[in-house]
Image: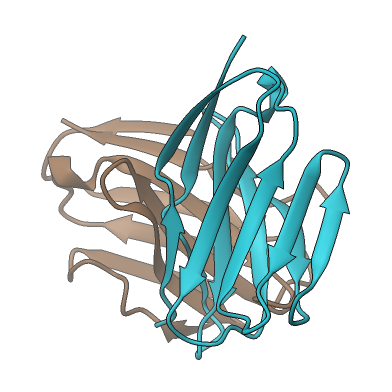
Chain colours: A cyan, B brown
Amino acid sequence: GQQVMQIPQYQHVQEGEDFTTYCNSSTTLSNIQWYKQRPGGHPVFLIQLVKSGEVKKQKRLTFQFGEAKKNSSLHITATQTTDVGTYFCAAQGSARQLTFGSGTQLTVLP
Amino acid sequence: DAGVIQSPRHEVTEMGQEVTLRCKPISGHDYLFWYRQTMMRGLELLIYFNNNVPIDDSGMPEDRFSAKMPNASFSTLKIQPSEPRDSAVYFCASSLVPGNTEAFFGQGTRLTVV
């Protein structure tokens, strides 16, 4: 099935600092999705990227899809304590299954 | 719609017992997924259904695990017999077209096998 590697596994930042997580695939992806899971919660959909080189923004969050559609990133500007959680990328496999990356656990220190 | 509904929210059982987890997907969603989440292995896809038919069960760890979807509004994941290493959070998710539309997750069932 489709495999996506995600780094870093953990990230601690001071409130106000920026944060970035990266997702990489060895094969070309048709699209990629990003989810956020709050501590004790369930994954919640954030966004989907489809086009090569696509950039989308949601307030302080910026999502990018690489030109070769093999990598993606999520960047948060000026983190807040409400950003705490685990961020996952997810890609569609050949059999339409949705495979998740290992996630990046973000801790924001006040 | 109330979203994806899972029950129970928490389950504590003794090793060797049978455990049944339940899921009600969002009405109209053709795809249903069962995931298992642990610290060590992250979010693993166990099995998924399309129109009530199991499509890919390659993620099911072993024969002790089985899943059914008798109709469009109900699915079960059964573990028999359960073992301590099965302790995890089990999520059910549903979607219209996986990978093209968002997957909606239930609240999860936290299973502890002692």
Looking at the picture, tell me which residue is in the foreground, A10 or B97. A10
Residue at left 66%, top 26%? A17
Whether A38 is drawn above or below A15: the answer is below
Within the image, what quadrant is residue B35 found in?
bottom left
Q: Position of residue A55 (x, y in %)?
A: 81, 65
Whether B4 is drawn above or below B9: the answer is below
Residue at left 60%, top 45%? A20
- Residue B2 seen by the camera: yes
Q: Position of residue A100 (x, y in %)?
A: 49, 63
Within the image, what quadrant is residue B23 found in?
bottom right
Q: Assign the N terminus of chain A to one quadrant of the image.
A: bottom left
Q: Position of residue A101 (x, y in %)?
A: 46, 60
- Residue B105 seen by the camera: no
Residue A2 left/right relative to B29: left
Looking at the picture, tell me which residue is in the foreground, B37 or A76. A76
Residue at left 74%, top 28%? A78
Residue B5 left/right relative to A102: right
Residue at left 63%, top 81%? A69
Looking at the picture, tell me which residue is in the foreground, A97 or A14. A14
Q: Assign the C terminus of chain A to one quadrant of the image.
A: top right
Residue B113 left/right relative to B5: left
